[in-house]
Image (spheres, rainbow, N blue to C red):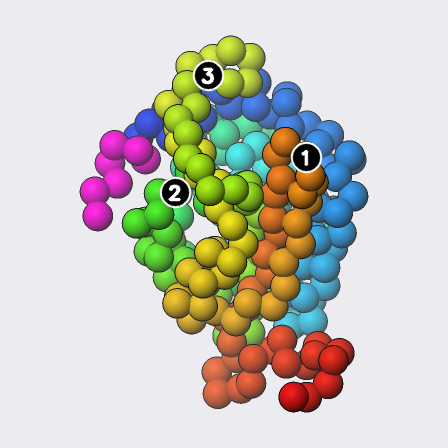
Amino acid sequence: MNTDGWLTDTRTSYDTVAASYADYIRGALAGAPYVRAALTLFADLVHTTGGGPVADVGCGPGHITAHLHESGLDAFGIDLSPAMVDLARRDHPGLRFQVGSMTDLDLADESCAGLLAFWSLIHIPDDAVPTVLAHFRRVLRPGGPLLLGFHVGTESRLKTEGYGGHPMKVHIHRRHPDRVAAWLRDAGFTVEAHLLTDPDGSAPGALLFARRPPDGGEPVADRDNLAGRR
């Protein structure tokens, strides 16, 4: 898989818009109650499995990483853009941030108690998604939860300008939750739940919860089958 072209374009684009994007996204969680609720649930799931390091992959300026930290998680951020990582370190000096790519995730096997990728998988082309999800599963501990946030739809488009009018060259891939869930199952995850946000609006999103199954155990989702056994 040749990732050099689109990865370089994505890195350069977010280096260019880093400061404007940080200003744009600052305070966004305050107006997103369902997203905040999903993050609270994710934090509870991590705590329930014993806690430990949590990776925010595609962390941008670190606002979600900081929110997770305030929820009591040992959260750290990874982003492709060095400029984004610099901003995250500046704005959240007590937290850990590093430059890295989800297509070649430089984390040890089973080193994370949880992993989150919030609207960062949207720049990954379809043929690279299985590689990314394989890395996510590899670095998660057995039983560790995964939370994905992404745009819902079927189309892909090239974004050439954004966040203050700066030039960009990134593809935005919109996907249906069922398609992402199928990729997750193929990668060895148990899919537990998903939530649609703003489904009737112009920018619908999805929050999808999954988990690396415990070694030798039943899928964790079976514990929450309120409809009873079938």
Q: Is residue 161 left or right of residue 44?
A: left
User: For the point 59% across and 56% down, which residue is it?
Assistant: 208
Q: Is residue 5 magenta?
A: yes
Q: Is residue 206 magenta?
A: no
**Which span of residues is magenta-colored?**
1-7
Q: Nearer the viewer, residue 81 or 30?
A: 30
Q: Is residue 30 left or right of residue 2?
A: right
Would you place residue 213 above or below residue 64 in this image?
A: below
Q: Residues within 10 Å of mark 2 (few under 14, many from 20)?
A: many
Q: Earlier in the sequence, mark 1 or mark 3?
A: 3
Identity of the amino acid at label 2?
Ile
| Residue 161, disc | 3
Q: Is residue 7 left or right of residue 142?
A: left
Where residue 11 appears, x then y in whole percent? 38, 30
Q: CA distance from mark 1 to mark 3?
A: 22 Å
**Residue ID for mark 1:** 201
Q: Nearer the viewer, residue 162 or 136?
A: 162
Q: Mark 2: which secondary structure?
A: loop
Identity of the amino acid at label 3?
Glu
Identity of the amino acid at label 1?
Gly
Where residue 1 appears, x then y in whole percent? 21, 48
**Residue ID for mark 2:** 124
Where residue 92 appears, x then y in whole percent? 63, 35
Q: CA distance from mark 2 to mark 3?
A: 18 Å
Residue 69 visible from this viewpoint: no
Q: Mark 1: which secondary structure?
A: loop
Quadrant in which the C terminus appears: bottom right
